[in-house]
Image (cartoon, rainbow, N blue to C red):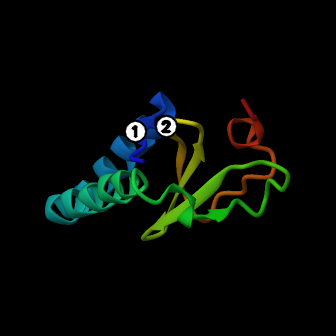
Amino acid sequence: MAYRTVWSRGAAAALIRATEYIAIDSPRHAQTFRREAVSASRSLCHSPLRGRFVPEVPGTANRELFVRSYRLIYRVDADNVEILRFIHAARDLRNDTTVRAES
């Protein structure tokens, strides 16, 4: 079964901000980075459980994949893979309510 990938507004906005920041120094690298992030999210359509559980938020079903130094955090439901967050790996998620919330 193929799942549908859905980006939250916040995650999509974060990808845009990261791409714009990288583009300040290298527009070419920014576009490559964006393609890698989108490709990683699309790859979840066929194998959504391959990402690890987010270690800072035990007890949730949220998973993550790494795209360079960024974390693509997502949740899988019956039909969709919802991209919850796209954040730099150095960020502390222990108090992030977006990642903690279960639907």
The first of marks 1 and 2 along the sequence is: 1
Give whichever of 17, 65 is nearer the camera.
65
Residue at the outermost left position: 28
Q: Position of residue 88 (x, y in %)?
A: 53, 59
Give whichever of 77, 14 is nearer the camera.
77
Residue tagged 2: 80
- Residue at the location (38% across, 43% down)? 17
Q: Position of residue 61 (x, y in %)?
A: 72, 49
Q: Position of residue 86 (x, y in %)?
A: 50, 49
Give whichever of 47, 94 is nearer the camera.
47
Query: Relative to residue 15, is residue 89 depicted above or below?
Result: below
Amino acid at the residue labelled 1: Arg
Tell me if 50 is positioned left or right of 31 in this view. Answer: right
Tell me if 5 is positioned left or right of 31 in this view. Answer: right
Give whichever of 88, 50 is nearer the camera.
50
Residue tagged 1: 4
- Residue at the location (58% across, 44% down)? 76
Query: Relative to residue 70, is residue 83 depicted above or below?
Result: above
Helix, strand or loop under label 2: strand
- Residue at the location (50% across, 33% down)? 10
Helix, strand or loop under label 1: strand
